[in-house]
Amino acid sequence: MLRRVAALRRPAAFLALALAVVLVANPAYLSFWHTSYSHHVEEVPDSEIPEEADVLAYEDLSPDAQHAVRKSVEGDGSHVVYREGNVPGEFFYSDHASLGRGIYFVEYRGGYYELNTMAGGGFAFYYWFYEALLAGFGLAVGVVGYRTSNGDESPLLALGLTALGVALLLTSPLTRFPAGEGVWTTAVVVAFGVGALAALWPRVRPMSTADR
């Protein structure tokens, strides 16, 4: 068993160090997260649709537009897109809406829905905070990977942190938050704490032993 674990030292260290670089560099590829494109729908009777409004048939929409409408209707009434390349071309996004430019009416599965689209971003500090935590976790993974390469750390710890880092990337804005934005941001905070503990534990352990 010990030989098998020892054999993992080099690949575990390599994977941890490679992932560390990716995580530390996250602000370079997560910058699109700072601007969100929101879709909000509300079912309305056809009698409330303005006469001057053009009712859009769901079947005539582009695949991206259909995805936004379907996710909004089947979800909690809203859907957010974070990458401009995923934004439906037939919709208009800004902080001001008017009929045909941010306000639309869509026929979907026999019902009529008012669709409101808008673009905006939160406080920059909010995004920087989580990107900094993710980068900090990446540094911790790198420290553990380096110690693993020197034989000073168990490869299992490096592999565990690597798996956690990959999970964060797979549930990040890169994949449109499949588990939800709130779940991801909470996971980033937890991962940062776990990573910091793993990186600092060799220094904390002697101090706790000396106190005894």
Image: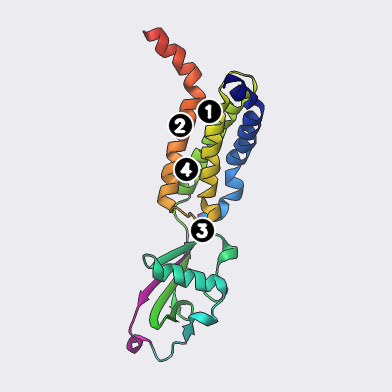
Vertical relation: 186 (above or below) 173: above
Crowd rating for badge 3 (residues with CA inside 10 Å; few <14, some 14–19, many 20+): some
Magenta span has 38?
A: yes
Residue 157's mark? 1
Q: Disc 4 or 2, which lies upstream in sequence? A: 4
- Judging from the image, what secondary structure is the residue with disc 2 in? helix
User: Distance from label 1 to label 4 (Cα)?
Assistant: 26 Å
Q: Does the image show residue 92?
A: no
Chain part drawn in magenta: 34-49
Do the CB atoms of the residues marked 3 and 2 lie less than 8 Å apart?
no
Residue assigned mark 2: 194
Residue assigned mark 4: 129
Q: Which numbered mark, 4 or 2, is in the foreground of this view?
A: 2
Residue assigned mark 3: 35
Q: Disc 1 or 4, which lies upstream in sequence? A: 4
Displayed quadrant of residue 154: top right
Looking at the rendered structure, the number of numbered marks drawn on it comes to 4
- Judging from the image, what secondary structure is the residue with disc 3 in? loop
What residue is at 47 percent from the left and 43 percent from the top? 129
- Judging from the image, what secondary structure is the residue with disc 4 in? helix
- Which amino acid lies under the numbered mark 2 shown in the image of this protein? Val
- Look at the image and tell me in which quarter the N terminus lies: top right
